[in-house]
Image: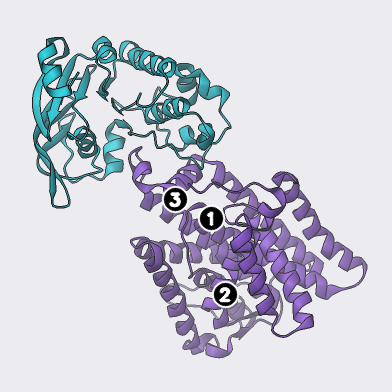
Amino acid sequence: MIRESTLNAALLILLLAVPLAALLLDEPFIITLATRAVIFAIAGVGLNLALGFGGLVSLGHAAFFGIGGYAMGILAYHAQTFTPIMEWPFVIQGTKAMPVIWLTAVVASAIAALGIGVLSLRTTGIYFIMITLAFGQMLFFFTISWPAYGGEDGLSIYVRNGFAGLNTMDPITFFAICYGLLLAVLWLVSRIARSPFGLALGAARQNEARIQAVGQRPFTLYLVAFTISGAITGLAGALFADLNRFVSPTMFSWQTSGEIMVFVILGGVGRVFGPVAGAAMFIFLEHVLGGLSEFWHIYLGAILLGIVLFARGGLIGLVSGREVADD
Amino acid sequence: MSLLSLRNVTAFYGPSQALFDVSLSLEAGQVLALMGRNGMGKSTTVKVICRLLPNAQGQVAFDGRDLSGLPAFRVARLGIGLVPEGRRCFTNLTVYENLIAVARPGEWTFAKVVELFPALQERRDQNAASLSGGEQQMLAIGRALMTNPRLLILDEATEGLAPVIRQQIWAAIARLKQETGMAILVIDKSLSELGTIADSAVILEKGRSAWSGPFRDLTPELTDRYLGV
């Protein structure tokens, strides 16, 4: 067995080594695949905060992924068409500056997560799953019927957004930006997980009555976790839209929520680096199995079943051998 | 004014009435022993105090404030620390994490808790699930202290423990009384140990307050009649 910290470090090194090797071999497609893995990992790390640490099975995280994507799409679209987003009561212009787009995506997703959380966290179990799914689908159908931003066809952004002094159209540069953000998000979530808040969140997941008896309000713990989780997933959405230079209602679909959940389960629920392993494995399987058969999802499903049945600690647990205590 | 007072409290589990007009009061700095045979309503009374079970009638007041309608976490924040029956530590967390997760500002810190229970320092990074029963009990008491309560409630804190561990727990409780002046409500069956720390006692019989008064006034007739000892 390998220590989990060693495994985590190896994972980060591997994720960095693959695109660097692809750069040397002049394989830009591989760099794009690695960038997708990194962005999906960010989305998974976000969901893992709610699902893994708080036990909140959200099937609506595509809502935040999509909000992040559309935050990027709307700002960039208005910047490229030189039209203001709004003129009254004050003028808001579009922008192609990545940091501003990220900030907008994070704030918009956090506000949405706060609103959705306030309503959905009054329910538990299957009702929570259904209500989060319903919010995601509501936004999906809203964007389909939103002609100002492409409706069902989505919205194309011709040139990738900019980051001070960098050529973001260069695949390895954009990968480096996403990788840097993944490191920042991993650092943030590992700090949260070890903080009194994160520990109380884990305790609330285990027993709500018990955590109340020591002065903690489970609803507040869950709501804060859900909001931060949504904000991180929103950031991933903005990056994903920038990678593809395209946003569409698909980002809000329940399949997107399901895929983000697959990254978490595949890698290891409740492990900070679990979604990184899960997203990397997902992209690898998509690429390898997708080359063998167009029905590659069947094989992915079989692997997922195996993980759920025989390796509840996910890929990280399988290799490092330590299961996360449940109760 | 009493720190804690219950007046004519009734409570139900579904349709079954568990408490009938229970009354008691506890002054600041005092230790009250809540006694009775199994199933007489001691733990139910504690649940009502901590608002883990609502009272149907009567009044529960802490420091002059009516606790009716307050959620359990607000009651805990007012200064009531509960050591529940069966320890109930967070088994997915380590000793240190169990304590830090619930910490509230005040004199009780991790350092002070491990000074009271040195065994917890040795087990600092162990999962709570891997601790012995006695260590889990120490952790449960430490966790309640980390909320910096003004009233500590110990529900069967020494039940099922080895005699040497029970002595350590009783010594710690006595130290809490002497050094901190914390009010303590303790449920236990060990009359001899209770006698060394309790100032007053309330005996429950079939969910009713059957007797209350200074602990020293407990006669063998009373303990024989209500406690069967």
Three-letter code, disc 2 = Thr
Residue density around tag 2, few if under 14, some if 14–19, many if 20 or more, within 10 Å: many
Chain B is which colour?
A: cyan
Chain to which mark 3 belongs: A
Side of A287 relative to A73 (left or right): right
The residue where tag 3 is placed is A205
Specify the subunit that label 1 lies on: A
Report the residue at 43% width, 25% height from top.
Answer: B138
B49 shown above or below B159 = below
Label 1, secondary structure: give it. Answer: helix
Q: Chain A is drawn in which colour?
A: purple
The one of B157 and A27 positioned closer to us in this rendering: B157
Q: What residue type is labelled 3?
A: Arg
Q: Disc 3 and disc 1: Cα gap in Å?
A: 9 Å
Tell me, for residue A52, which label it has, or none.
1
Tag 1: residue type? Gly
Which of the two labelled residues, at mark 1 and mark 2, occupies the earlier sequence position? 1
Indicate the secondary structure of the residue bearing disc 2.
helix
Q: Which of pointers 2 and 3 lies earlier in the amino acid sequence?
A: 3
Q: Do labels 3 and 1 share a chain?
A: yes
| Contact check, label 3 and label 1, Cβ < 8 Å | no
Q: If you read the primary sequence from the N terminus, does the residue marked by circle 3 or circle 1 appear first?
A: 1
Give residue A111's position: percent from left, percent from top.
Answer: 44, 63
Mark 2 lies on residue: A256
Which of discs 2 and 3 lies nearer the camera? The answer is: 3
Disc 1/disc 2 C-alpha distance (Å): 18 Å
Of A103 and A56, which appears nearest the observer? A56
- Residue at x 41% of width, y 73% of height: A89
At numbered mark 3, what does the secondary structure look like: helix, strand or loop?
helix
Viewer-proximal residue, A152 or A168? A152
- Residue drawn at (15%, 30%), measured in percent from left and top? B64
